[in-house]
Image (cartoon, grey):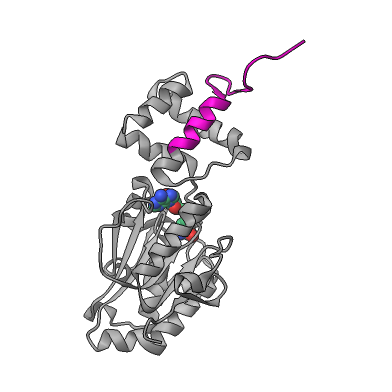
Amino acid sequence: MSIDGPPILDTGEAQLSEDDFQRIARIAKAGWGLNLDPAKKPLIRSRLGRRLKAVGLTDFKAYCAVIESGDTVESEHFVSALTTNVTHFYRETHHFETIETEFAASLAARAKAGHRIRIWSAGCSSGQEPYSLAASLLAVLPDAARYDVKILATDIDLGVLKTAQSGLYEAKTAAFPTPQLKARVFDPAQEPAARDIAVRPELKALITFRRLNLVQPWPFAGQFQIVMCRNVAIYFDKATQKTLWERFSEILAPDGLLFIGHSERIPNPPELGLSPIGITSYRKINAKN
Ligand SMILES: C[S@@+](CC[C@H](N)C(=O)[O-])C[C@H]1O[C@@H](n2cnc3c(N)ncnc32)[C@H](O)[C@@H]1O
């Protein structure tokens, strides 16, 4: 018995041929810098298979044509299906400890002296990261609202941004490393009666949420004192990652800090003007030094 033609994966309904997978991979790379691992084919088939059903299509070729036509709504779902939004409050707590030390040492004084302080949570998912940043900021500088201190939180996925913007989280899934950190973000008086709990309004007031595709031009020119882009570049191919690290370095103010995800690495930080200062943490080398 012989089998002719490229291998076909059976989805139960639609089938994902090797050609279709390669086409999906090309679209994902060109539009969003995503690197689709062939080992994840079954997962991709299953997730995009659900999108096929949702839009009433029966084959991946037709689905690819929809994405290639520039359908913005379906493109959202496409990216969402190919990436994960997993996040936690105070994830990799050591990064927030470094930030609090930095604020205590210099940024709080700079803010009080009238300088602007900008922090960027790039790939913020449903908001747990920027709210943790805001809570750390207020722990060191309780009157931050009086100064020009702001957090920009961006993601490509409008669905997660909606949750982030609402500041509402299911009480039973809002996990924290310690009760003390949880009390910084949520007033304990809210629990346990409500199903959803709301973040403290003073945290929300510090954050602006925006949609932004990291692999396209960024609509701002100013510099950031802190950039946090964690567990996002892991989806990108090496060349896209390198470009991203370069762009972050360019946008960092002298002595600014960059934090990346636990499984991400910057191959040669000094080449990009960055100096490692801890686990997945870097400081922009001051050009005047
Ligand atoms: C695993 S979450 C990381 C959330 C948070 N930074 C953390 O570490 O907990 C990855 C996020 O990156 C976003 N993302 C993926 N590709 C992106 C792109 N090209 N531009 C902007 N955000 C992107 C996804 O929508 C997702 O919300």
- Residue 203 occupies which quadrant of the picture? bottom left
Above-or-below relation of 169 to 256: above
* 196, above or below 281, in the image: above
Magenta segment: does it hold 203? no
Q: Position of residue 83 (x, y in %)?
A: 48, 45
Q: Residue at x 34, y 83 (%)?
A: 141
Q: Position of residue 136 (x, y in %)?
A: 41, 76
Q: For the C terminus, give its image quadrant.
A: bottom left
Region of the chain picked out in magenta, as a range: 1-27
**Is residue 58 at least partly visible in the picture?**
yes
Query: Image point 57% across, 73% down: which residue?
Result: 279
Indicate yes or no whether the magenta region holds residue 4: yes
- Residue 135: percent from left, percent from top: 39, 73
- Front residue of 222 and 209: 222
Q: Give the farthest residue toward the right.
A: 1
* Identity of the residue drawn at 51% across and 26% down: 20
